[in-house]
Image: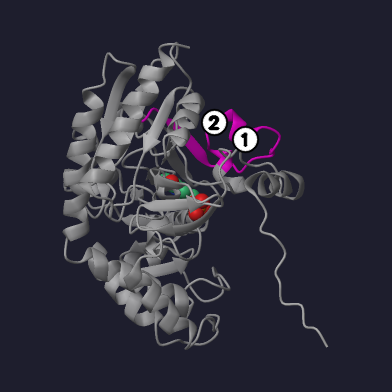
Amino acid sequence: MTVHTSTPPALGSSEHIQLTEQWAAHNYHPLPVVLSSGDGAWVTDVDGKRYLDCLAGYSALNFGHRNQRLLAVAHQQLEQLTLTSRAFFNDQLGLFARDLAQMCGKDMVLPMNTGAEAVETALKVARRWGYEVKGVPADQATIIVMDGNFHGRTTTIVSFSTDEVARRHFAPFTTGFRTVPYGNAAALEAAIDHTTVGVLIEPIQGEGGVIIPPEAYLQEVRALCDRHRVLMMADEIQSGLGRTGRTFACDHEQVVPDMYILGKALGGGLYPVSAVVADHDVLGVITPGSHGSTFGGNPLAAALGREVVAMLSTGEIQQRSSELGRQLHDGLEALIGHGVESVRSRGLWAGVDVNPELLSGRQLCESLLARGVLAKDTHGSTIRLAPPLVATEEDIAFLLTAFQSALLDAKTW
Ligand SMILES: *Cc1c(COP(=O)(O)O)cnc(C)c1O
């Protein structure tokens, strides 16, 4: 009897694109590249072409693709136990919660999976804290959010988005939110009243285009929250865990929020892991049955999250981010007047506005793709660069060369 062991021919990139377009909903507009493997800061497509990954999973991949330390932890935990539900204890969650809380200088952790879930958790905690601790009248709690925010995609979160594309035809929306201009402390103070329980803020607005608030603004927000007894809720899902050259973006202003909202890199780019981290007087309002998640705090997530915390504990990766960030910033600044209009950066995280008459952000990303660099435009002619923090000086030089060449090319269009 003949045994046929031959595998069918591998699909090419156009077949994968066609399958995805036909069978997966069109909630994204990806660049035409089909990736099949990754290593550190680099990924390889189905045709064997390599690219420097300058999006890094929106900073979920701060530690790079297939980080060996994280892979080893994942393999070990996969062989032990992966899910218990929170109906029982497991031997990983307590250790993870302790290490993460200590890194944040807080008392306790509420583990979830995705960023949006952690934001939702923070909103619920703030409201309950408002009623039970601050004494806000029943059903009146308000939370202040910022113009240009991005906090995720759930119905409540898009209720206070200011991006019409994210909101259109998803009404009716959740009430109880007030929007103020980002970076304006006077406007924030004017919006606070006796119903205000929290201020939800990105210390740097990532999806907004790496928008850095004016100096001392975060300190002013902290002071206003203290004065009016309002919880400062820092969404560090994208800005945190080394991206800006510090553990948290709030660290640049020596500000400690009441709640850290974490996600993305907390799972090491392997697995969705998110959390809200706060003191007992805040997270203590959550009681059995009032909040939960089937997967939140599972042993695989906890083992990975704990290893991420351990990797941040030496400060090496933060140092690396800030050194490579300086190289990236200097290189991009040298392109101002040569197609680049402005550069905002902190650590290895840059928002670059290019001359819209030269090319759109999308066109620039397509041109970078042809040159072996993956990046993503945000709004119009702004692109964001955030390579994995394990990149090398040579990688950053490669990115800068590709960027310059793409702009030079655009001149002749
Ligand atoms: C990505 C992101 C979120 C949402 O995280 P998901 O895991 O996609 O739900 C929330 N806040 C900020 C600042 C983010 O960058």
Looking at mark 1, is its residue's CB closer than 8 Å to ligand 1? no
- Where, by quadrant of the figure, is residue 341 drawn? top left
Q: Amino acid at mark 1?
A: Arg
Write down the residue under mark 1: 167
Is residue 219 positioned above or below 308 on the image?
above
Disc 1 element: helix
Is residue 174 positioned above or below 298 on the image?
above
Q: Which residues are magenta?
A: 158-182
Horizontal placement of 349 versus 12: left or right? Answer: left
Inspect the magenta stretch and tell me whether residue 180 lies in it: yes
Front residue of 398 and 283: 398
Mark 2–mark 1 Cα distance, whole angstroms, equals 7 Å
- Where, by quadrant of the figure, is residue 194 drawn? top left
Horizontal placement of 299 versus 34: left or right? Answer: left
Q: Amino acid at mark 2?
A: Asp
Asked if the residue under mark 1 is in contact with the one under mark 2, i.e. CB atoms within 8 Å, the reply is: yes
Asked whether the viewer can see residue 39, the reply is: yes
Residue beneath the point at 32% across and 72% down = 69
Is residue 29 positioned above or below 110 on the image?
above
- What percent of the width, then of the height, locates residue 225? 29, 44
Disc 2 element: loop
**Disc 2 packing (10 Å; few <14; some 14–19; many ≥20):** some
